[in-house]
Amino acid sequence: METLKLGFIGAGFIAKFQVLAMTQVNNTELVGVYSKEGSGDLQKYAQKNDVGKCTVYKSIRELCNNCDAVAIYAPNYARIEIMEEIVAAVKAGAELKGIICEKPLARTVKEAQQLVDLANGVHLNTAYHENQIHMKSIHNALIQLEPVQRIMGPIALARSSEEHSGPHEPWFWDPTRQGGGVLADMGCHSIAVSWYVLTPFDKPVTFLEPVSVSCDVSLLKWGKPDFRKKLMDKMGVDYNKLPAEDFCTGIITFRNPETGQLVKGQFSNSWMYDKQGLRLLMEGLGPGYTFEINSLRSPLEVFIADEAAESVANAEAALEKATASRGLMAIQPNEADLYGYVDETRDTARAFLNNKKPLLDWKFGLEITKLVQASYMAAEQKKTIDLTDQGIQKDLMNFQSMVAQGRGGEILFS
């Protein structure tokens, strides 16, 4: 079996999650990493998990010369600069089979288009890593419902949410570096999943045409004075001066171009969910049928009493973004597989090794970026945005949300 030799750019939280996914994909090997911080730690983590030697390289060009494909797992604000270095390496002779970018593709539509153009300019195959679309629970639900959809018709309403208590790293909280707040960080997940679930089973992922979007963004928990101070003390981000939304909700309407049927995708996301940990809640409702997914429903539960809690070193050993180390705890035995990272990696490896397109490419990532930015536009203008208006599409190309500009207080504190 041919093996895809991967190189990581970035060595943070998501890179380590991807290492766990690779332990369950036989035809991948992590041969190297380049990162300004944490390269040595990732190397040790990769070797401990037996996914490859993972040599630490001193430059992106050197990394590109020693792998089959590179994965951009670096912060959003560094994407363009990184991609330019990858393109330079390819032009200098690096023979890459493809390039991966973690969601979201970019902070703005303009940046996303630039990334797509850079990849196209050197004929690179691209994979957009949106793990939740690859979740086995979603695919199994759609497989079970395929015969029902043939008779009754496709799903008409999809609801998708991702919620937890807040990101790990300071740059995620900084809207000028991240590109927004929870809508930019996690709304991209829920919007993509809703679009995918609504799509008829035998159609491509962008078959349905986005028609309109409405959205509301708010600063609820992390706008309170005591939590602003906590965020400043822990992350060094001042939400008095640079606030970002910690809650968003919206609806996107899609049209089936063959039948004219309108369907709805509802998304809801927050950084204020203080329960067992990260929760993914997804539903699909069709005529006479439905499915529901809740990632906190686990086959494994553990109870830790107060007197035993002192011995628990890490709450997140139980579940990503867990905030407690005692009481009744839901524990997911295989989070990397549950959240779709394993199947995402498998799909990418299969595509790159066979010179085929993966399920999701950067053009799809560009479309998701448009929908996220259109959601910010709708929230700022407090009205439904007509996505069929060519003027709106033109405006989106140069749009940067007020939150991302550092002017979030004008809409979040008013």
Image (spheres, rainbow, N blue to C red):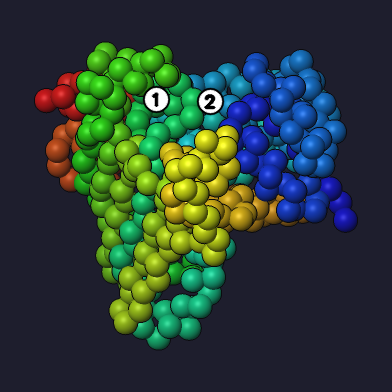
Image mark count: 2
Q: Residue at x 52, y 59 (%)?
A: 301
On screen, residue 51 versus residue 195, left or right, reads right
Which residue type does callout 1 highlight? Trp
Q: Which residue is mark 2?
A: 75
Relative image position of residue 346 (x, y in whole percent): 69, 54
Residue 236 against residue 107 in the figure, above or below = above
6 or 360, which lies in front? 6
75 or 397, which lies in front? 75
Q: Secondary structure at mark 1?
A: helix
Q: Which mark is residue 59?
A: none
On screen, residue 168 versus residue 160, left or right, reads right
Q: Residue at x 74, y 33 (%)?
A: 45
Q: Residue furthest right?
A: 1
Closer to the eye: label 2 or 1: 1
Residue 287 against residue 12 in the figure, above or below = below
Relative image position of residue 388 (x, y in whole percent): 27, 49
In which quadrant is the N terminus drawn?
bottom right
362 or 176, which lies in front? 176
Which residue type does callout 2 highlight? Pro
Relative image position of residue 3 (x, y in whole percent): 84, 48
On screen, residue 188 versus residue 333, left or right, reads left
Q: Tell me if residue 188 can be seen.
A: no
Q: Residue at x 73, y 53 (%)?
A: 24
Q: Residue furthest front?
A: 307
Q: Secondary structure at mark 2?
A: loop
Q: Tell me if residue 55 can be seen.
A: yes
